[in-house]
Image (cartoon, rainbow, N blue to C red):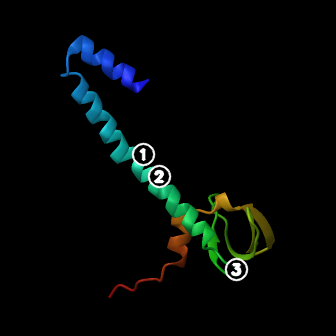
């Protein structure tokens, strides 16, 4: 389909219109698609490496400690009990920030 559009653009406008279209696709790939794919890979790797005892933050903002893991879910211990979540509910950025060592400013 994209090839057809390029051929139509090349036939009607010459190659002057083809170059900006290719540049737009390249820019979309490097600034939008590629970073999103990388972030998804990092999220999957982080979730796969979780183990019992890890502290996590869910996308809903619930803080807790993992006490049980299954293939698709995990059990989190919170102040007033236990809650089961799907593994996709873990917030990578918030969990890493929670587990990062605190830096002391002098």
Of residues 90 and 51, the one nearer the viewer is: 51
- Going 68% across and 82% down the picture, which residue do you hit? 53
Residue wearing tag 3 = 52
- Residue 39, image x, y percentages: 47, 57
At a point 26% along the width and 13% down the height, the residue shown is 11
* Quadrant showing the N terminus: top left
Q: Earlier in the sequence, mark 1 or mark 3?
A: 1
What's the distance in space between the residues labelled 1 and 3, CA to CA? 33 Å
User: Horizontal placement of 7 versus 61: left or right?
Assistant: left
State the image coordinates of residue 52 (x, y, percent, origin top left): 70, 80
> What's the CA distance linking mark 2 and mark 3?
27 Å
| Near-viewer residue (36 or 93) | 36
**In which quadrant of the rendered view does residue 70 lie?**
bottom right
Residue designated by label 2: 37
Mark 2 / mark 3, whichever is N-terminal: 2
- How would you rate the neighbour count of disc 2 (Cα within 10 Å): few for under 14, some for 14-19, many for 20 or more? few
């Amino acid at each position: 389909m994209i090839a057809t559009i390029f051929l139509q653009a090349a036939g009607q406008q010459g190659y002057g219109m083809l170059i900006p279209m290719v540049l737009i696709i390249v820019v979309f790939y490097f600034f939008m698609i590629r970073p999103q794919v990388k972030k998804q890979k990092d999220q999957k790797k982080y979730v796969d490496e979780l183990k019992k005892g890890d502290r996590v933050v869910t996308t809903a903002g619930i803080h807790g400690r993992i006490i049980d893991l299954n293939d698709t879910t995990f059990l989190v211990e919170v102040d007033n009990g236990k809650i089961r979540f799907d593994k996709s509910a873990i917030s990578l950025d918030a969990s890493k920030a929670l587990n990062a060592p605190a830096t002391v400013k002098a």
